[in-house]
Image (spheres, grey):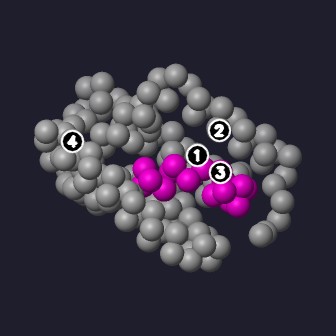
Amino acid sequence: MGSKPTHEQAQLHLQVYDQRREAKLRQARDWFGKNYIVNNIDDAMRIAPMGSETGAYVGMVIGYWEQACALLNYGLLHEDLFFETSGEFFGVWEALKPVVPTFRERFVNKQILAHLEEAAKRYEAWSEHRNPGHITAMRQFMQQMRGQAASAAKA
C-alpha cells in the first residue's frame, strides 16, 4: 500500500461519493447496470438514443465517472482509496469499451472517455497485483450477467 490519503483527498473522496447518492444519478446508475448491454454503436443508439431518457441516463453515468476518474488521474483523489471503494467505474468502462473506439472516430475526438479508460487500465494492474485473477473473474461474472439480461430482454 502506498501513502495514506491526505485529509483533503479524503474530503474530496467523500464529496465525490456523496454526488453518487443524488436521486436521478442513482436512477441512471441503476438503469445503466441493468440495461446497458451493447456490442456495437447500433446497440448503443437503439437502447439509449440521444435525446431520450435512457440517453440522458447514459450521459449522466459516463459523465459522473469520467469526472471522478479525471480527479483520480490528476492526483486529486488517492488511488488506493479510490480503487478500494469505487469499483463501479470499472464495470461502467467494461460496458462502454465495445463502443468507445467508434464514438471517438465518429466524433473525431480521441479523448472521449480517456480518463475512465486510463483509470480502468490502472485499476486492472492494481487489482492484479493485489488479487491475481480478480479481473478475469469479474469479467466472467459480468459476461454471465449480460447474457442473462439479454435473454430476459428477449423473453
> From mark 2 to mark 1, how far is it between C-alphas?
7 Å
**Amino acid type at image mark 1:** Ala
N-terminal label among 2 and 4: 2
Residue indicated by mark 1: 68
Question: In the image, which disc is placed on residue 152?
Answer: 4
Query: Where on the picture, by quarter, is residue 147?
Result: bottom left
In the image, taking residue 155 as reference, residue 131 lies left or right, namely right
Quadrant of the frame with the C terminus: top left
Residues rendered magenta in the picture: 78-93
> From mark 1 to mark 4, how far is it between C-alphas?
32 Å
Viewer-nearest of labels 4 and 3? 4
> Above or below — where is 83 with respect to 7?
below
**Amino acid type at image mark 4:** Ala
Q: Measuring from the top left, give residue 52's x and y in whole percent.
A: 25, 26
N-terminal label among 2 and 1: 2
N-terminal label among 1 and 4: 1
